[in-house]
Image (cartoon, rainbow, N blue to C red):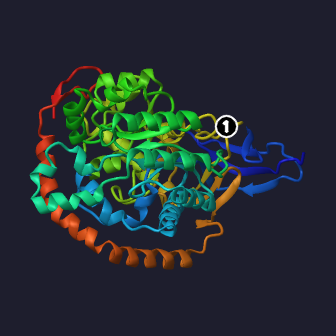
Amino acid sequence: MARKKMVVVRGGRLVDIAKHAAPPADILIEGDTVKEIGRPGLAAPADAEVIDAKGMLMHPGLVNGHTHGHGVLAKGMGDKWTLELLLTAAPWIGGNRTAEDKYLSTFLGAAEMLLKGCTAAYDLTFEFPAPTPEGIAACGQAYADAGMRAVLAPMVADFSFFEVIPGLVDAMPAALRADTERYRLAPRQQTLSAIRKALKAWKFDQDLIKPAVAPTIPHHCSDPFLTGCFRLAREFGAPIQSHVQESKVQVVVGQKLWGLTQTGHLDKLGMLGPDFSVAHGVWLDRDDMRRLADHGSSVVHNPGSNMRLGNGIADTRGMLDLGVNLGVGTDGASCSDNQNMYEAMRLASFASKVRGPDTDRWLSTDEVLIAATEGSAKALGFGDKVGRIAPGYKADIVFLDLAAINWLPLNDATNQIVHTEDGTSVHSVMVGGRMVVRDRKLVGVDLASLVGKVEAARARLAKANAENKKMFERLEGVVNRFCPGLARTPYHIDHFAGGHHDHQH
């Protein structure tokens, strides 16, 4: 067997997250894996490639625990939108996509993440009226071509948004009610069969790009559909992620349907486990958090979109106190407008602090950075090989330029990665021992060509979705009156795991 390529990184400073320090360190990489970390001058084979990291701060590649690659072509298309308005806008901002559009949107998101220090993502991608093996393969190829790790999940349901909000359709004029029929999703079995076909035909190296299943929101799915997704995930060893208790409307609908929280209902169906992750979890109560912790499940915190869509501020301290694995995500570019994990970390820190003046309940920067690396990696199912720079882990390393303005002066590496860095200091990025960003440029990407393709797609999709836009404008007022009214339904939740407060939202 041929000896794996050896690389030695010399002259850099390696962040020690817990100690808030960045001592000088050399890193020896064998193939795609870190073999050894040592003091400057670390012994390496004579033929090892040398990477000069002088003047660089090295940190583990950030891991985006929740995003939507299909949303990247829709960045900036909305402003004062609740989650329910975003769902109403979906046919306009994401409709009529070709396989090439799906590839392009996903590739563009991967490019942005890599340029901003993120080396792996959990991507819930959507196709209407059902997922297709070809569409999923196009998205997987986009990550492979960008050189980024991903967990890629078809985002699926068997009911549309309009069918599952009690009373919403009845509140519409008859003509509008009839128009919503066009948004019905494919029948349950057709969607489950398409997922099975895609999982069976998976062609990507699962160390880099692996499949998952994403029943989008529990109450958008019948129980047979949810359990069908669960069985497929089990059969193919794939993780599951769902948007759970993201908005107050979701909580109220869950109570009306099941007399339970969404988490309680998923638990009853046997879906919780180490391979299950909650996206958002803004409205989890303490019992929900305990259930998730007991099953080894994760919550991916998306503070940017939680605030952007008016959903609230998740009790991340309560989750950590009760033993829930916490990750961090950006959410999709249609509802957070960028794919910047540095911003997501900064907001995660700040959001914990605006909940109240009790500093014991605030997230520390080391907790945030660990959540955005190890915590998210665990949610992706990559926790044993991604999220740390350590022997045996994949060589996913971000190199920050210490001469950049964000790092003058360097006082505390951990604090400054979370609170000061915004992506502009990212000099180079390595994924699995291979440089995918070098000197602030994506390796092997013709940016001018990408710009042209993106603009052509934007113009064509704007024209193709003009009718969907008009439909959204007709629905917007009804949805925006009805759903906030539903959200005013009294609901008691103890947001503080210590039990000191009982808030009614």
Query: Residue 477 vs residue 207: left or right?
Result: left
Question: Residue 129: percent from the left, percent from the top?
Answer: 38, 57
State the residue position of label 1: 390
127 or 322, nearer to the observer: 127
Q: Which quarter of the picture shows residue 438?
A: bottom right
Question: Residue 285: percent from the left, percent from the top?
Answer: 28, 27
Residue 367 appears in the figure = no
Residue in the image at 29% along x and 20% along y:
498
Residue in the image at 35% along x and 59% along y:
334
Question: Residue 127: percent from the left, percent from the top?
Answer: 42, 57
Residue 478 appears in the figure = yes
Crowd band around label 1 with a 10 angstrom C-alpha radius: few (<14), some (14–19), many (20+): some
Say what secondary structure mark 1 lies in: loop
463 or 38, nearer to the observer: 463
Query: Residue 8 vs residue 249: left or right?
Result: right
Vertical order, 144 against 495 (above or below)? below
Q: Where is the C terminus found, in terms of image quarters?
A: top left
Q: Amino acid at mark 1?
A: Ala
Residue in the image at 67% along x and 43% along y:
394
Q: Where is the N terminus found, in terms of image quarters?
A: top right
Query: Residue 11 vs residue 226: left or right?
Result: right
192 or 270, nearer to the observer: 192
Residue in the image at 15% along x and 49% along y:
168
